[in-house]
Amino acid sequence: MGKQLRLTPVARWVLQLFVILLAAFTLLRIITFLVFKPAQLEWAEAIPSFLLGARYDIRWICIALAPLLLIGSIPSLSPFTSAKAKKIWLIYLVSITSLILLFFGADFGHFDYVETRLNASALNFIEDFAISMKMLWQSYPLFWIFTALSIIVYSIYRLYTWTHRKLDGIREDAVYFKPLRTIWLTAFIFIGICGNNPAKPLKWSDAFQLGDNFKAYLALNPLQNFFTTLKFREPFADDGRAREHSSRIKQMLGMNTVTADLDFKRKVTYPQPAKPMNVVLVVCESFSMYKSSMSGNPLNTTPYFQQLSNEGLFFNHCFSPHFGTARGVFTLLTGIPDVQLSKFSTRNERALNQHTIINDFTKHSKFYFIGGNSEFNNFKGLLVKNIDGLNLFEEGMYKSKPFNVWGISDKDLFDEAQEVLSKEQQPFFAIIQTADNHRPFVVPEEDKPFVDNRKFTEEELKRNGFASQDEFTAFAYTDYCLRKFMEQAKQQSWFENTLFVFVGDHGVKGDAGNLYPSAWTNERLTDEHIPLLFYAPAIIKPELRSEAVSQADVLPTIAGLLQQPHSNTTLGRDLLRKQSDDFSFIIHHDEAKIGIVNNEFYYILNTNLQKDTLVPVRFNSPVLSTEEYERLKQKMSAETIAFYETARWMLLNNQKQKVAAGRHGP
C-alpha cells in the first residue's frame, strides 16, 4: 500500500510546477499591489485580497496542469517514458506559461489605463488586430518588449527542462496505471479548480465581497476576470425593467405625457420654417476639458479654441456618458449611451440600424470624414446603416498620404473636407472625426514649426494633466488644426450659412486637482468631461453655459437651432428648450459603475459592490444635512437606474423601421 501511494515522476513534476507557478502568480500580484495600490491602503488591509487571490490562482494553475497529470500518467504518453512525449509536454507547458505571461502583461497596461483587471473588452481591439498592433508599434518599444519576453520564455523553458531532468532518473514500475498514485492528487486538482467546496465553487463575484474595487481586482487575476466577463459581451434588455422606470425617464426628458409605456417618441415641430443652413460637426479626439485653455489650465494648450468659445455658445460642463471613441460616436449619432458591457455597440449587429435625428435633415447631403480606416471599431457599419444616403470619406480616398496608424493628419483631413464641401451645391450635414490627439502622439514634420513648442518639466506636465511632452504637443496640435480649418472656412462662400459644432468624443484620466473638485480625479470624471461649442455668428450670440449637459444632447440641439422638424426617440434633449433638470448619465464599464452628474453633485453606484456614494462637483456645492444627503442620494439613485435600464432597452429597440412605422419598442 505504501509503495502504491508513492508519487510517480509525473505527479512529482506536477507538484513542482504547481509550486513554481503559484510563486509566479503571487509575485505578479505583489507587483500589482505595489504599483497600483491607493496611497492610503496598507499591506495588512490587502491580506484578504491575497488569500482570496491565491484561490483564484490555484484554480487556473490546476486547469493548466490537469492535462499533464491525467494524460501524462498514461505510460505511453508520459514525459518520462517517451522522448517525443517529453518534447510535446515541454512545448505545452512553455506555451501555456507564455499565454499566462501575455495575459499579465496586458493586464498591467489595462490596470494602468482603467484601474481594473484585464477583461473581455480587450477583444474590441483584437477584432481590429492589425490597426491595434500598428498603433502599439508606433507608441511603445515593442521590439525590446518582445525581446525581453523571448528571453523570459527561454528561461522558463530551461527551468522546466531542469526540473524534468531532476526527476528523469526515477524509474516507474512497469504497471499501466496505478490509480492510488495519482487519485489523491487528481482530487486535489479538482478541488483546486472548484476553488472551494465543489458544491459551492468559487465565483468571480466573490471578490467583490471584499467591499472595495481595488481589493476586489487585486484578488482576481486577469485570467479569471477576462473569461468571466466574456458573458457580458452579449446585449441584454429587460422590457419589464424598462417599463418600470419609463415614467421617471419621461419626467427627466421633460415629456408632456408621462405614462408607463415604452414609447419615448417626441415629434418636434417649430412655428417657423427650417433654416436651410449647413452643419459641420467636428468630433475632437480625446478633447479633455481639464487639459484645455477653457478650463483655466495654466499650460494654455488651446488658445484659439478658447477665443472661438468666447464667440459662440459654449457649454463648459458637458459630459460624454463614457470613455472611448466608438462609444462616444455611437451616443452622438443615436442619443443612446452605449451601456453594453465588454463590447462596443458599434460591433453589435442588433444595436445598429438605429433611428437618428440626422436623417430628419432630408434636404441636406450627408458627409462623414475620417482620416483612417472606417472599419476600425466598425464605424462603417454604424455610419452606413444608421445615416441614409451617407457619403463616407476615409483612408485611401484622399489625395493626402497616410501619416500614421490613424491615416492622414488632422490638418490634411480638414483640408480634404473643405475641398469636398466647397463643391456642394445644396445644404450639407458634415461630420469630421479627428484622431491625432491619441497615441502615438506624433505631429507631422511640416506642421511642427506652427505648433506650440514650449517644453515643460515632467512635474509641470503631470500637475496639469499631461502624461508626457508628446501628449501636450498633440493636444496643442489639435488647436492648430482647428485654427487652420476655421481660418480657411471663413474664406468660403458657405461659411456665413453654416452652424459649426465642436465636441470631444471623450476625455482622458489625469490629475485635475488644480482646476476641479476631487471628483474629477478620484472618480475619473476627467474621462468624460468634454467641451461643447455651437458656433454660428449669424444666429448665435456669445454665451457661456455652466449646467451639466450630455453628448447625447448634441443632435437635438442642432435640430433646435436650425428649427428642423424631427422625431426624437431616445435620451437627448434640446439644450435651449429643455423643461427638466440638468444632468448627464455616466458609465464606467470596466469598473461596473453607473451614475448621474448634475450641477452640484455626482452620484455613483458600483453595481459589483452594490455600494453608492454622492460627491460634490463644484467647490461651492451646498453642504447637505444627513437627511438631505440621503434624500438626494435616493433620488439620484432612482434616476441612475432608470436611465441605465432604459438605455439598455433602447439599444435593441430603436430601429429605424419601427420608428418609421410609428412604433417604438417591441
Image (cartoon, grey):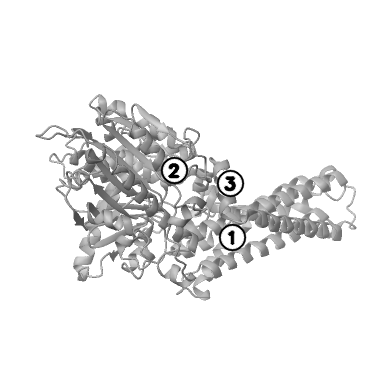
Check disc 1 and report the residue beneath it.
55
| Residue drawn at point x = 59 percent, y = 50 percent | 137
Q: Which mark is residue 517?
A: none
Q: Is 284 positioned to the left or the right of 106 in the image? A: left
Q: Nearer the viewer, residue 351 or 372?
A: 372
Give x and y (percent) for residue 515.
32, 68
- The reply to whether dot 3 and dot 2 touch (C-beta < 8 Å) is no
Q: Secondary structure at mark 2?
A: helix
Q: Quadrant of the C terminus?
A: top left
The tag earlier along the polypeptide, 1 or 3, is 1
Check disc 2 and report the residue beneath it.
412
Q: Is 315 positioned to the left or the right of 13 in the image? A: left
Q: Nearer the viewer, residue 67 or 178?
A: 67
Q: Is 64 positioned to the left or the right of 510 in the image? A: right
Distance from the alpha carbon under mark 1 to that under mark 3? 34 Å
Distance from the alpha carbon under mark 2 to that under mark 1? 54 Å
Q: Nearer the viewer, residue 642 or 462?
A: 462
Density class for disc 3 (Cα within 10 Å; few <14, some 14-19, many ≥20) is: some
Check disc 3 and report the residue beneath it.
133
Give x and y (percent) for residue 561.
18, 41
Q: Amino acid at mark 2?
A: Asp
